[in-house]
Image: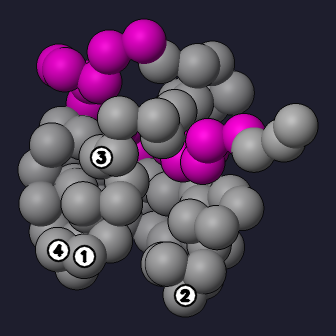
């Protein structure tokens, strides 16, 4: 299995801090989630990190067994 990790407000939206998913293309993994959650995760300000490395583009990214994909919400501050 691969793991999705939700940080900050995204944890509230997902109603969990992490979720195990079947490995596969990120687009396929997100399509299997609740549509409301998927929309939030694909927001233009949400960043993704695969195994600790920030991704600049998720196109073509395939989750493998044991991978961790973290979703980082926009940072707020003043």
Do the numbered discs 4 and 1 sit on residues whose CB atoms are within 8 Å? yes
Instruction: Give the x, y percent position of residue 23.
Output: 29, 49
Name which of mark 1 and mark 3 comes first in the sequence.
Answer: 1
Examine the rendering and report whether any part of residue 29 can be seen: yes
Res. 42 mark: 3
Residue at image mark 1: 36
Q: Is residue 67 magenta?
A: yes
Which portion, as a residue range, is magenta?
A: 56-75
Do the numbered discs 3 and 2 sit on residues whose CB atoms are within 8 Å? no
Q: Residues within 10 Å of mark 3 (few under 14, many from 20)?
A: few
Disc 4 to disc 1, how far (Cα)? 4 Å
Q: Quadrant of residue 27?
A: top left
Res. 15 mark: 2
Residue at image mark 4: 35
The residue at the point 59 percent across, 58 percent down is 5
Disc 4 to disc 3, how far (Cα)? 11 Å
Res. 64 mark: none
Q: Is residue 32 magenta?
A: no
Disc 2 to disc 4, how far (Cα)? 14 Å
Secondary structure beneath label 1: helix
Disc 1 to disc 3, how far (Cα)? 10 Å
The residue at the point 12 percent across, 60 percent down is 31
Name which of mark 3 and mark 2 comes first in the sequence.
Answer: 2
Asked whether 49 or 51 is in front, the reply is 49
Query: Which secondary structure dominates the residues rendered in magenta?
Result: loop
């Amino acid at each position: 299995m691969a793991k999705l990790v939700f940080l900050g407000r995204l944890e509230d939206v997902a109603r969990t801090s992490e979720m195990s998913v079947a490995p596969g293309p990120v687009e396929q993994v997100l399509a299997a989630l609740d549509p409301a959650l998927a929309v939030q995760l694909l927001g233009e300000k949400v960043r993704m990190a695969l195994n600790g490395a920030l991704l600049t583009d998720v196109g073509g990214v395939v989750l493998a067994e044991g991978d961790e994909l973290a979703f980082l919400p926009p940072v707020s501050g003043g």
